[in-house]
Image: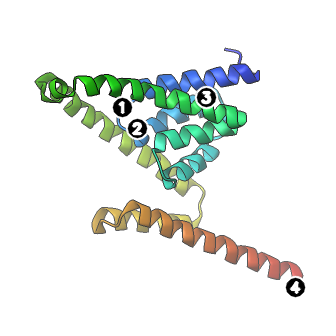
Amino acid sequence: MKTDTAANKLKTLFCSNFMISACTFGGGGVIIPVLQKKYVEDLKWIEEDEMMDMIAIAQSSPGIMAVNTSIIIGYRIAGIRGAVCSIAGSVLPPMVILSIISFIYEAFCTNYIVALVLRGMEAGVAAVMINVSINMSANVVKHKNLLNDILLAAAAVAAIFFGVPIIKLILICGAISIAAVVINGYKEKVRGTA
């Protein structure tokens, strides 16, 4: 598929996000590996490290993680128009599906077969989220940055064993990373003037 023109990129962004959103259940943690496969591996529009940065930004921003990631990807690839196409593609399927379900909600939520299907989907979602966690952790560790390794381990322990809310962990890790960048920049400046 030829995707070098602006119109083709916008069409690909919309269609890709539409299909991913329509066929992926379980929220942001589940949709991330699918987005990564599409934009990093298949289309090769984004590098893996850049994708991980986008995911981190989307996770730490208010709103729905899948939509946030789609906005960032769309903007990175085709500017404002790309972001709009990505949003439309990401939001339309759940909006249509939830609108239909809302009309038949009572029958839907009490249906035994639907309950079994949802239970089975929970297991699949859990497996995908474990996969995402392993891949993101491996990406942090592969850069061989001691501070990042310590932050990863400390955040995991704080979340798993002490129940520290994720937003607090993100803010604390972000603040520590900003402080490290400022301190390293100051040290480089001092060394440069010496």
Residue most extreme to the top: 1
Amino acid at circle 3 = Cys
Residue 97, placed above or below residue 149: above
Residue under label 4: 194
Which residue in the structure is indicated by mark 1? 25
Q: Which mark is residue 30?
A: 2
| Contact? badges 1 and 3 (CB < 8 Å) | no
In primary-sequence order, the first of circles 4 and 1 is 1
Q: Amino acid at mark 4?
A: Ala
Q: Look at the image and tell me whether residue 178 can be seen.
A: yes
Specify whether 184 is left or right of 140: right
Left or right? Give the position of 138 relative to 124.
Answer: right
Question: Gap in Å between the C-alphas at discs 3 and 2?
Answer: 21 Å
Colouring: rainbow
What residue is drawn where x is 72% and y is 20%?
7
- Crowdedness near tag 4: few (<14), some (14–19) or many (≥20) residues, C-alpha within 10 Å: few
Residue at image point 53% right, 43% down: 68
- Location of residue 98 in the rendering, given as x and y in whole percent from the top left corner: 34, 28
Marks 1 and 2, Cα distance to the nearest angstrom?
7 Å
Circle 3/circle 2 CB separation < 8 Å = no
Disc 2 versus disc 4: nearer the observer: 2
Determine the image quadrant of residue 165: bottom left
Mark 2: few/some/many CA within 10 Å (<14, 14-19, 20+): many
Residue 77 seen from this side: no
In which quarter of the view is residue 179 placed?
Answer: bottom right
